[in-house]
């Protein structure tokens, strides 16, 4: 009997040691996305939030680089969060929304429609940036299954060590430094860029043989619409004001028709650039940091000021700035925002570029 007990204790102890070792090695080898490719840290940051949000933005870089939740709070008392990632595909946005509903129910969801151009999974690298940081749940499993390219395997998203076990020769100080912690890199999902690089001549877009969006994209847009309706959430479709990549009139007409058919608001912000006051072309003061692909900090603040006012004209959103408890939470966010803003502007003045981005 004692022999059996000892054997059981030994097996349990061995399993615990193995599990602990697996966990530690996995924590060491998975990419940290702190010093490089910081977009890969965006998904996980959402789970640090302690309060709920009136507005959730979902989509690709045209949301996380173009909208400032801090501006929406400072000017209108709107609480918001951006659940966006680099080249976030529409099914990934849908599952990000499902994931949000595990924790809160916003009043408005804003979806940027550029990803309707992609009807199939694109690349493992972008999948990893968006999905590795999702908390394990049935929603994550569905998101991964919908996103995987031909050579990917679901098990590697559940146990990332199986994917990153060969990263030993790529390890750096970043991997040690952030093995058990992470720094805050965004402002409620907004990635700040204060530098300026004006747009030049934008080439005419090449005509397409077929302007139809794929059935897969329409399926997930229908699912998103239905999910919002089931939860009494207003769904807003937008096209962010980026000069490139091209947003064809034929694509826009399809979204206009869909919005009208489903009773949704759709606003093409490319048509509002002058009204918003966005300047893409002035060499020293342009509102873009990469030739018109995305807005910089000044552009994001202008767009957010305009869009916050638009939201208030369409929906009955509360001004939470008189809520002292919530205001205290947001004051910490504001302090971090202006600390980073000052830091970036100082770096630009010193070096002429952001050397750490």
Image: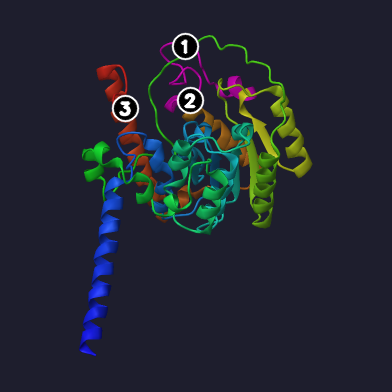
Task: Look at mark 1 in the image and give the residue it sits on.
Answer: 282
Report the disc number at residue 295: 2
Q: Which residues are magenta?
A: 271-298
Q: CA distance from mark 2 to mark 3?
A: 15 Å
Crowding at dot 1, Cα within 10 Å, few <14 / some 14-19 / many 20+, comes out as some
Mark 3 surroundings: few (<14), some (14-19) or many (≥20) residues within 10 A: many
Q: Which residue is depicted at the point 70% across and 46% down?
A: 222
Q: Quadrant of residue 34?
A: top left
Left or right of 168, for residue 255: right
Q: Does 85 appear in magenta? A: no
Residue 280 on the magenta segment: yes
Q: Which is more N-terminal, label 3 or label 2?
A: 2
Give whichever of 264, 126 is nearer the camera.
126
* x then y, percent, for residue 1: 24, 90
Q: Let me know if residue 281 appears in the view.
A: yes
Q: Which residue is mark 3?
A: 344
């Amino acid at each position: 009997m004692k022999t059996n007990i000892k054997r059981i204790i030994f097996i349990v102890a061995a399993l615990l040691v193995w599990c602990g070792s697996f966990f530690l090695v996995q924590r060491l080898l998975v990419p940290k996305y702190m010093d490089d490719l910081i977009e890969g840290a965006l998904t996980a940051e959402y789970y640090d939030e302690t309060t709920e949000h009136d507005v959730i933005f979902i989509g690709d870089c045209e949301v996380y680089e173009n909208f400032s939740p801090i501006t929406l709070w400072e000017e209108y008392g709107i609480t918001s969060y951006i659940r966006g990632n680099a080249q976030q595909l529409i099914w990934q946005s849908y599952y990000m929304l499902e994931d949000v509903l595990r924790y809160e129910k916003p009043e408005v969801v804003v979806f940027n429609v550029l990803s309707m151009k992609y009807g199939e999974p694109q690349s493992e690298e972008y999948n990893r940036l968006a999905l590795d940081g999702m908390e394990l749940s049935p929603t994550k499993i569905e998101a991964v299954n919908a996103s995987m390219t031909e050579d990917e395997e679901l098990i590697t998203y559940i146990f990332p060590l199986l994917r990153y076990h060969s990263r030993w020769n790529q390890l750096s100080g970043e991997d040690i430094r952030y093995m058990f912690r992470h720094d805050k890199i965004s402002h409620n999902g907004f990635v700040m860029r204060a530098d300026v690089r004006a747009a030049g001549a934008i080439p005419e877009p090449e005509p397409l043989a077929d302007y139809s969006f794929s059935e897969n994209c329409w399926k997930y847009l229908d699912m998103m619409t239905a999910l919002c309706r089931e939860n009494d959430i207003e769904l807003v479709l937008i096209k962010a004001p980026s000069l490139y990549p091209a947003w064809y009139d034929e694509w826009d007409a399809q979204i206009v028709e869909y919005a009208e058919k489903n009773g949704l608001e759709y606003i093409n912000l490319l048509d509002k650039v002058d009204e918003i006051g966005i300047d893409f072309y002035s060499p020293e003061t342009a509102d873009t940091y990469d030739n018109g692909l995305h807005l910089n900090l000044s552009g994001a603040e202008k767009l957010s000021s305009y869009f916050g006012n638009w939201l208030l004209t369409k929906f009955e959103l509360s001004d939470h700035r008189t809520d002292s408890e919530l205001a205290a939470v947001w004051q910490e966010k504001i302090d971090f925002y202006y600390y980073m803003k000052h830091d970036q502007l100082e770096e630009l003045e010193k070096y002429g570029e952001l050397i750490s981005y």
